[in-house]
Image: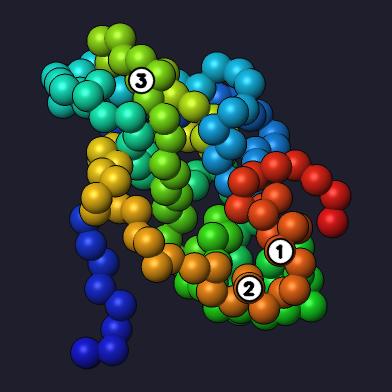
Amino acid sequence: MPNSPKSYHVFNSIGVIRTPYKDVAPYQSIQTDEGDFRLVLNKQFAEGLHLLNTFNYIYVIYALDQIKLRTSRMLISPPWVPDMSIGVFASRSPNRPNPIGISVVKIKKIRQNIIHISGIDAFDGTPILDIKPYLDLLDAKKDANFGWANQTGDENHLALHIKGVPHKH
């Protein structure tokens, strides 16, 4: 059946994310966040960190295993624009068909199998699926925009969300 979903490989965790977030995490990573933020890889993957310290930033891909409310809705409302509907794929919502998160974080230092990082928007104990280097030439796109978010009319409020700054709606 050409229209039936196809299942793919089952992913295994390569380690866990350690953060101060037990019950509530920010919507986005906050680079200047205070606290202990680490990626603790399983020891058999430590060799894979060779020369990662030559990069300033990395992508961290992780399983959103601690989401309390899982929905399969394809239309959602952003928290700061509750009267607007957007497609889940036009959002950064954690409620997704495949609960996978991705964040760009700064490497502070690497010791054996532990990467000390800037703030990340993940709960303590979140499973890590993969790590990839962030490359300015490939990953920073000069013509990137805010898409539908430009239509909200409140650019200051939008900036708070983009930066992950806690605030009231």
Residue type highlighted by circle 2: Asn
Q: Is residue 21 left or right of residue 147?
A: right
Q: What is the x, y in percent for residue 6? A: 25, 73
Q: Of the residues under marks 1 and 3, which one precedes in the sequence?
A: 3
- In this view, the residue farthest toward the front is 142
| Residue drawn at point x = 43 percent, y = 35 percent | 105
The image shows residue 133, relative to residue 15, as above or below, that is below
Q: Amino acid at mark 1?
A: Glu
Q: Are marks 1 and 3 in contact (CB under 8 Å)?
A: no
Nearer the viewer's eye, disc 2 or disc 3? 2
Mark 2 and mark 1 residues within 8 Å of each other at the beta carbon: yes
Q: As rendered, which of 50 and 62 lies closer to the eye?
A: 50
Q: Residue at x 49, y 68 (%)?
A: 145
Q: Are marks 2 and 3 in contact (CB under 8 Å)?
A: no
- Can you see residue 33? yes
Q: Which residue is mark 1?
A: 155
